[in-house]
Amino acid sequence: MMPNLGMFPSRWGRIAQGWKWALGLPVCLLVAMAGHPAQAGANLLKNPGFEEVGPDTHSPPNWASRSESASRGTVTDQEPHAGRQCIAIPANTAMEQRVEGVEPGAYLARCWVKSKAEQPVTLLLQNPDRPWAAYTCAEVTVPSDHWVQIEAFCSLDRRGTLVLALGGTSKDFRFYHGTPGEMGAAILADDCELFRCEPKTPPRLVVWDAKVDLAGKVAQLDKDRWSPVEGQSHIFAGTPVFQGWQLAGAVRKEDGGLMLYSAQDQTLKPRAVVMPSPAFRVSQCHLVHTNGRTGIQVASENGGRAYTAWVSQRGVVSIEARGVPQFVVRDCRLRYGLLPSFVGTDICYAPQKLPGLKQISIPSTQWFVGLVDGNDSMMVAAWDTDSQAVALGLSGEGENRIIDSLSIATDRAGFSLSLVEHPRLWHQEALKEDWLGEYVPIGWERPFPARWMGQFFVTSGRKPAFRDPYMDYSFPIADTKTRMWGTWFEDWNHYPFYFDGPRTVLHFDKKFIPNGDAFIYFLEPAAAELNSPCEIVEEVLGREKAAALFDFDGVGMRKLRYSTPNEFIYDRPVCATTARLSHLKQGDKQTVGVNLATHLYEFIREIRGRIDQYAAFFEQMNGYLDSQQKAHPEWQPYFAELQALVVEAQSKTNGIYSLPLATVEQRIEDMKQLLRAGSGDGFDCGKLDVRGPAGTQDDLCRRYNRQVIRLFETAALNCGDSPEKAAIAKHVWDESRKVLRQPTRWESRRTLYFFEP
């Protein structure tokens, strides 16, 4: 009997705690992987051990065979993992259970599996109503004749449904999900679980009065010497010190700076200093309580300026200023700065790519994530409005160049800061060209399961061209080797990142050359005892405003309007539909054949609408940039680069619009007449074939998607010399995000859900 891999303290996983790697891991590594475990909630699955049996053994209560399965599962009393029974799942067959009313949060699915042969087994966990926001397809290779536990991780951003599916998948499933493996032999399954990660309640917020001025020298929490502060008000005699979960802070009297630390037991690790600008000497610090919040009010020597640092139990500091136009978060030592965008891609500020600059303005996108030097911390900032000016300060040279400050205007509203702390929290990896075509495991292993992102510069190795990608992308890391058509790259290609157990494997096709560094990070709720960046933003801005900012529904594929039956065979791209027509039986020509032909036109019509949407965007953007250039002629080089991208995109629609939709519709009507009158099996579209215009449209959608992303990346990365220019980049960002919403399946998205719309 194999050991219970689920007992290891790594608890959560988007992919199996695979037997091949788990048995070889040293104990110290297993402990390191544990981090800060989260508590498991109740098992949400009904009949998880298949002990209940319905009218027949093929239908265990609460479970069903997936519709595309080759056969049906059968309850058996042979070799259960526990209890009296388990379920036998034949080859190419999967069992599933649907769980309604699931609350937002991070979820783990686990199942025990015993296979007749070493082979891949699929574990799918998703919200079927919103798979673009909640989806994990893990394909796990299991050994023969051993019970092993496999896992999959998924998070929900809102209340909804989760479906767990286990077993083998159909050819169509594997084609559209990009997974290569086939479960060719039967398996046994038992003791399935689905539970929510229940974060532990953080310790209560504690505030101390050091009674003396510590003069900015705070190395540890000296709880025995300091006086805990309680009650509704308090005037600090010495340095105010606080701790909220992993965050600690102290106020410096000489300049009003708020020193922030990560708290590890009683030891404090400096992370940043939040400075009012201009600085002021502190006359007095007060403890304040209002509406259930606790804060430290810091007043200047004459009382004319002040700020309150509100501290939450979960380690978030919110700055509310009076008479202070700006704050500068100094000494933060960030290797990378991110402006996250779930629609499109994250904007990455890499100091090494910005030589010679001491300060750059950035678009005011309302949240920022910094990857702290040392790889064990992330700094998260969120501000109240998108009209607050924000800038980064840079220092150092070469590999030692860092982002050392973040400035935020506070003349209109405040801002908040927090830290995410964990060993190996993010990773940087230098890419090597000799990795081309290889699957290369790197040294970094994920410290806890989450929706990890891999970011790197994508290029074909040639000069920038409309057909080729030439920009930074943020890729969600897959849970298995994945092959796909189009999207980020042209033609068929293999996905660049995936997890094999805890290992991270990189792969590069000839279409995208390893170039520079990649780095890996996460943003969404994770299976660890920490606040994710998204959860911090939700706490600061409120759930409703944060949801609008994240816009997860913008990642969902556009819904196309068809009159054909709501069946999978009528909802495929033009090439697949045309291929199906070529093998059509004579008896189906007047029914299925006519429906398929109707679908050809409707599919082309709908994608033409997407092209129209992009054309309108580029027309509007051209007008906006032209007006801004007239208002700011001194910024002509900045506008010229953006306008060149817009003009290039506009020149690509000529071939599309040279063939009117009415001509396509007439071809389809002629095709229907031939189908109704046809004899014999098969159908050759001949001169009526519409794959040419359809394929051109599909390709143009993909390339327009990339061009828009490149447009707003260029605008954001080159606006640093002026806050006014950063405001223009913010407008480009906003309009780009609007047009990128709900793309076709050929366009890049921050999801691994590849199904047709």
Image (tube, rainbow, N blue to C red):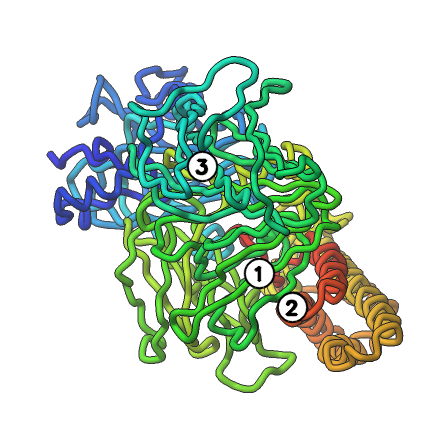
Q: Classify residue 23 by image quadrant.
A: top left
Q: Residue at x 31, y 36 (%)?
A: 220
| Cα–Cα gap, marks 3 and 2 | 31 Å
| Cα–Cα gap, marks 1 and 3 | 22 Å
Residue farthest to the bottom? 463
Q: Residues within 10 Å of mark 2 (few under 14, many from 20)?
A: many
Q: Is residue 352 left or right of residue 611?
A: left
Q: Is residue 198 above or below residue 405?
A: above
- The residue singled out by tag 2 in the image is 720
Q: Residues within 10 Å of mark 1 (few under 14, many from 20)?
A: many
Please indicate, yes or no, whether residue 297 appears anywhere in the rendered image: yes
**Label 3: element kind:** strand
Point out residue 305 in the picture as x, y percentages from the top left corner: 68, 39
Q: Residue at x 68, y 33 (%)?
A: 544
- The residue singled out by tag 3 in the image is 249
Q: Earlier in the sequence, mark 3 or mark 2?
A: 3
Residue closest to the eye, 482 or 264:
264
Of badges 3 and 2, the one in the foreground is 3
Q: What residue type is disc 3 on?
A: Gly
Q: Classify residue 413 by image quadrant.
A: top right
- The residue singled out by tag 1 in the image is 392
Q: Residue at x 69, y 58 (%)?
A: 740
Badge 2 vs badge 1, beta-carbon distance below 8 Å:
yes
Badge 1 vs badge 3, beta-carbon distance below 8 Å:
no
